[in-house]
Image (spheres, coloured by chain):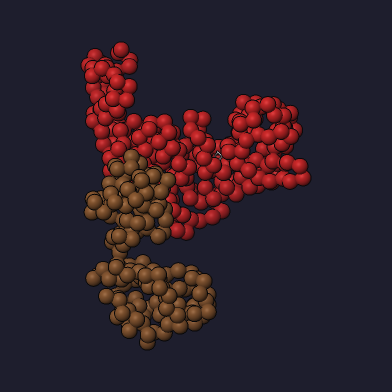
Chain colours: A brown, B red
Amino acid sequence: MRDKVNAIINKYNGDKGQLVSILQDIQTEYYYLPKEALIQVSETMSVPVSRVYDIATFFRAFSLEPRGKHLINVCLGTACHVRGAARILEKIERDLTIKRGGTSKDRKFTLETVNCMGACALGPVIKIDGEYFGQISTEKVDSLLNQFE
Amino acid sequence: MVTFTINERELKAEKDQTILQVARDNGIDIPTLCHNEALEPYGACRLCIVEVTKGARTRIVTSCLYPVEEGLKVKTDSPRITSNRKMILELLLARCSKNKVIRELASQMGIEQPSFKPEYLEDNDCIVCGLCVRACEQVVGVSAISLVNRGITKEPAAPFLEPAMDCIGCGSCFYICPTGAIKMEDRKETRIIYNWKVEFKLKKCKVCGNYWAPEKQLDYIKTKWNLPEDFFDTCPTCK
Ligand code: FES
């Protein structure tokens, strides 16, 4: 981990103003922000660890808990909601036996919700690893999730 | 120098001074909770609000942050300010309904019973003004704590909610806290700061035998100022 984190820091020339980007890259690498990585960032960049922790807990995009390899985002915006988004969320929760915000035991999936992705015409819509899947139904969920290794 | 008025009184001040500074220099009272002269203004508690009129436009600003301007008309106790400030205190009181300082301030504004119940939060002593965090960073230079999380769960805390490893036990956070939210205790030869889960050994004075300051704090000062090893063997009283 040390080398990977160092490479990320070096990519930004250790610029303190780029702390958020650095944490984003670390999160992309590990799907969450490991404590050792945050301490390493603090030490290498001479930023107080309290400051790093402050930022890491401020943004919702960051997670301090291990997350799954794939991130599922279920849209619960108004348009998706009236088209049954809640049922789809329930179905995924049941399939993966996790609640929203949680990560499946095999660390394959993390399930989150958003309140509108701006893709209302496609509703109900879910996003997996940044890819949008529109007009989802409860029947389609299984085959969709199976596509992800 | 700029000329402007506070409550219709004409005043002169340097351009980069804040309304709050000038008001206090001239004996005009504005209540504050998150302000301390030794620190950068922060604008967290909103208690210091005043009404400013510039040309045809009147609005409410925080006086601890707002710099004075030529021709500005400031009001510190208009009906609008009083009612807004009262609402701010109502909200603080909802969060800190048992806190002495907040209750006193509220009762000064004529609030005896809180109007709101906190639905999502337990009763708290902390108003999240950030004074402890700012003192630790700006005065002590240690930055052992920060404001963590966001929204209603925001709170001052040590990294990873573990014992604050960089804390030197100086107690600045405890002394500066306006509401007594930080719990610190000196028990004979140990100092405990409960909020940051830390304990420190206190140094014993060679002469009077009193335990007078955390060893870690004294070491920190010694290194910072290049002081001789035995510099703190006696306490300030016996020196
Ligand atoms: S003193 Fe200005 S906001 Fe607290």
Q: Does A35 sit left or right of A115 as displayed?
A: left
**Front residue (pair A40, B139):** A40
**Front residue (pair A23, B193):** A23
Residue at screen point 36% across, 66% down: A101
Quadrant housing residue A17: top left
Q: Quadrant of ligand 1?
A: top right
Q: Position of residue B107 (x, y in %)?
A: 57, 42
Vertical placement of residue B151 versus B196, above or below: below
Residue that extends furthest to the bottom in the rendered view of this protein? A139
Residue that extends furthest to the right in the rendered view of this protein? B56
Quadrant containing the C terminus of chain B in the rendered view = top left
Q: Position of residue B121 (x, y in %)?
A: 44, 55
Vertical placement of residue A74 versus A14, above or below: below
Vertical placement of residue B21 versus B111, above or below: above
Quadrant containing the N terminus of chain B in the rendered view = top right
Q: Does B113 sit left or right of A51 as displayed?
A: right
Residue at screen point 26% across, 30% down: B216
Quadrant housing residue A50: top left
Q: Does B50 sit left or right of B170 as displayed?
A: right
Vertical placement of residue B84 versus A92, above or below: above
Q: Position of residue B14 (x, y in %)?
A: 64, 27
Q: Position of residue A82 (x, y in %)?
A: 51, 80
Q: How many marks?
A: 0
